[in-house]
Amino acid sequence: MNKLGVFAALSATLLGSTAASAQLVDPALSRDIGRAVGEAAVAAERAAADAAVSAREAWRAARQGYSEGGGRYAGRVAPAQDFAGTEDAAVDACAQAAEQQGYDRGYRAVVRDIDGVERIPGGWNVDGVVDARRGWRDPRPESWGFRCAVRDGRVVNVDLGHEFARR
């Protein structure tokens, strides 16, 4: 039971005992206190319902990655997801670009291996191997090599095909 429910039950109990003792003094006072207890119970129930709604909205907003809610893109700065400033980020970006180029050619492409990463001024050169299948049931994938260039944190070129070095 949440804290608000416990507080509402406790206050209703205390006010209820007050109403019983007030009835001994004056029936009209008892009726007024009874109304006050009922109104307090209704207000506590509404507050608990509002708290549940706002907690659910906060949970949804946090789950979707928005800290304040307030719309789909409220207060968000678009992340630079395609920026590859480190060697690992360059390899990941090149692997995604090589797989995408395989998909664009009509293949189910999966990067099998990264053969080499070369640091050059302003970026990286990444060499690797892609397994390309025509479909999910294709028993023998074709192995293609790929060479990718990353300059200033962005993939600028992906060469994919049989003519590149493979294992």
Image: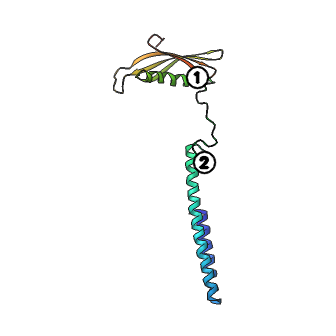
Specify the amino acid type for callout 1.
Ala
Secondary structure beneath disc 1? helix
Kind of residue at disc 2 = Gly
Say whether disc 1 or disc 2 marks the residue closer to the N-terminus.
2
Q: Say how many tags the image has.
A: 2
Residue 101, visible in the rendered structure = yes
Q: In front of the other: label 1 or label 2?
A: 2
Name the residue furthest top.
163
The structure residue drawn at horizontal position 42% and vertical position 20%, both measured from the top left corner, is 105
Q: Residue 68's spot in the image, x, y percent?
A: 62, 47
Give the camera-side residue of 117 and 19: 19
Please provide percent x and percent y for residue 71. Answer: 58, 46
Q: Quadrant of residue 141?
A: top left
Relative height, residue 29 to residue 82 (above, below): below
* Residue labelled with disc 1: 90
Check disc 2 and report the residue beneath it: 70
Residue 154 horizontal side relative to residue 128, left or right? right
Please indicate, yes or no, whether residue 21 appears anywhere in the rendered image.
no
Q: Quadrant of residue 38?
A: bottom right
Of 167 and 42, which appears nearest the observer? 42
Q: Residues within 10 Å of mark 1 (few under 14, many from 20)?
A: many
Residue at left offset 45%, top offset 19%: 130
Q: Residue at x 41, y 21 (%)?
A: 132
